[in-house]
């Protein structure tokens, strides 16, 4: 797979809305507005559990630049 990351439906929606993003180092960044949603905010600062390909890292960087 080279075009994206497989995410659970709710996480995918938050990712599409820019409320969840991934740093270049592969760390999950959750928007402060989700802090009251403890389940989602526990992801903040966690490392991705998959190794992103160079193409995926490029795509994640574009997403980061759009939302952060």
Image: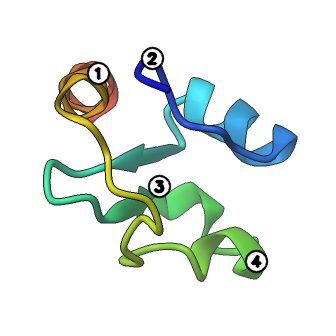
Residues 42 and 49: in front is 49
Question: Mark 1 — residue?
Answer: 59
| Snapshot quadrant of residue 9 | top right
Question: Mark 2 — residue?
Answer: 3
Question: Mark 3 — residue?
Answer: 31
Question: Which one is closest to the eye, mark 1 or mark 3?
Answer: 1
Query: Is 27 drawn above or below residue 6 in the view shown?
Result: below
Check whether the beta carbons of the residues at disc 2 and disc 3 lie within 8 A of each other.
Answer: no
Q: Earlier in the sequence, mark 4 or mark 2?
A: 2
Q: Residues within 10 Å of mark 4 (few under 14, many from 20)?
A: few
Query: Is 68 drawn above or below residue 39 in the view shown?
Result: above
Q: Earlier in the sequence, mark 2 or mark 1?
A: 2
Question: Which one is closest to the eye, mark 2 or mark 3?
Answer: 2
Where residue 34 appears, as percent x and y from the top left, is 63, 61
**Residue lying at 72% horizontally and 81% vertically, measured from the top left:** 38
| Snapshot quadrant of residue 61 | top left
Residues 58 and 40: in front is 58
Q: Earlier in the sequence, mark 1 or mark 4?
A: 4
> What is the spatial separation of the Cα atoms under label 2 and label 3, in whole angstroms?
24 Å
Q: Give the residue at the far right of this rendering.
A: 9
Q: Residues within 10 Å of mark 3 (few under 14, many from 20)?
A: some
> What is the spatial separation of the Cα atoms under label 4 and label 3, in whole angstroms?
13 Å
**Residue lying at 50% horizontally and 26% vertically, measured from the top left:** 1
Mark 3 residue element: loop
User: Which quadrant: the C terminus?
Assistant: top left
Check whether the beta carbons of the residues at disc 1 and disc 4 lie within 8 A of each other.
Answer: no
Question: Mark 4 — residue?
Answer: 39
> What is the spatial separation of the Cα atoms under label 2 and label 1, in whole angstroms?
8 Å
């Amino acid at each position: 797979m080279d075009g994206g990351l497989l995410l659970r439906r709710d996480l995918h929606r938050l990712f599409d809305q820019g409320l969840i993003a991934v740093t270049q180092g592969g760390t999950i960044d959750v928007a402060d507005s989700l802090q009251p949603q403890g389940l989602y905010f526990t992801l903040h600062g966690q490392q991705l559990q998959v190794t992103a390909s160079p193409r995926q890292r490029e795509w994640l960087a574009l997403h980061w630049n759009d939302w952060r």
